[in-house]
Amino acid sequence: METWMIIVIVGVAFVIALAVAWVAIGKKRSEDLRRRFGTEYDLAVKTTGSRSRAEADLSSRARRVEKLDIHPLSAGDHDRFADRWRSTQASFVDNPSGAVSEAETLVEEVMRARGYPVGDFDQRAADISVGHPRFVENYREARELAVASQRGAAKTEDLRRATVHYRALFEDLLETTDRGTVEVRR
């Protein structure tokens, strides 16, 4: 076999190996993002209409949140927020719509205290999707129900559901640290 043929064969084999590696890396990246973001991955694909655009968006979210100074709450803040939640939840019986509004405010305050920026709701939800992907879909629903409540278009059951969604995210934000969960003081 001539030398040039050997070089061509080795070159083609090298290109094929690179292509296989590229595909494998892409699949691993997709699997990692799907595992990290859960249902948010599927929503991003549906929203963007493209797996690659969705993955770029999710990766961008993760990079953005990594740059933030997200930190655990102090013991005093933890206890203060937990007490306020109990008061908010207790007020639901007499004032469901007020309790939902307070629950939304309380979630924002905990986010702020942990280091999340809390300006735009869509950005808040995107940021939450990085560290709390199991809760972001329900957080969006709670927000929609809170807005419906402000318009007078929410039923008591809707407000109960919003409160439950806010509580789940609130508890996760309250108990989550960079190392895992801390003991809950109730």
Image (cartoon, rainbow, N blue to C red):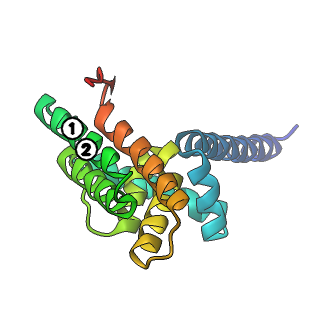
The Cα–Cα distance between marks 2 and 1, rounded to whole angstroms, is 6 Å
State whether residue 144 is above or below residue 12: below
The 10 Å Cα crowd at callout 1, few under 14, some 14 to 19, many 20 or more, is few
Question: Relative to 11, is 88 on the left or the right?
Answer: left
Which marked residue is nearer to the observer: mark 2 or mark 1?
A: 2
Relative image position of residue 80 (x, y in whole percent)? 15, 38
Relative image position of residue 106 (x, y in whole percent)? 26, 52
Q: Are marks 2 and 1 in contact (CB under 8 Å)?
A: yes
Task: Identify which residue, 116 or 24, lies in the foreground.
Answer: 116
Q: Quadrant of residue 123?
A: bottom left
Q: How many marks?
A: 2
* Kind of residue sitting beneath label 1: Asp
Residue 87 is labelled as: 2
The secondary structure type at the circle numbered 1 is helix
Question: Relative to 42, is 118 on the left or the right?
Answer: left
* Viewport quadrant of the C terminus: top left
Q: Quadrant of residue 48?
A: bottom right
Relative image position of residue 79 (x, y in whole percent)? 18, 32
The secondary structure type at the circle numbered 2 is helix
Residue found at the very far left of the displayed protein: 76
Q: Disc 1 marks which residue? A: 83
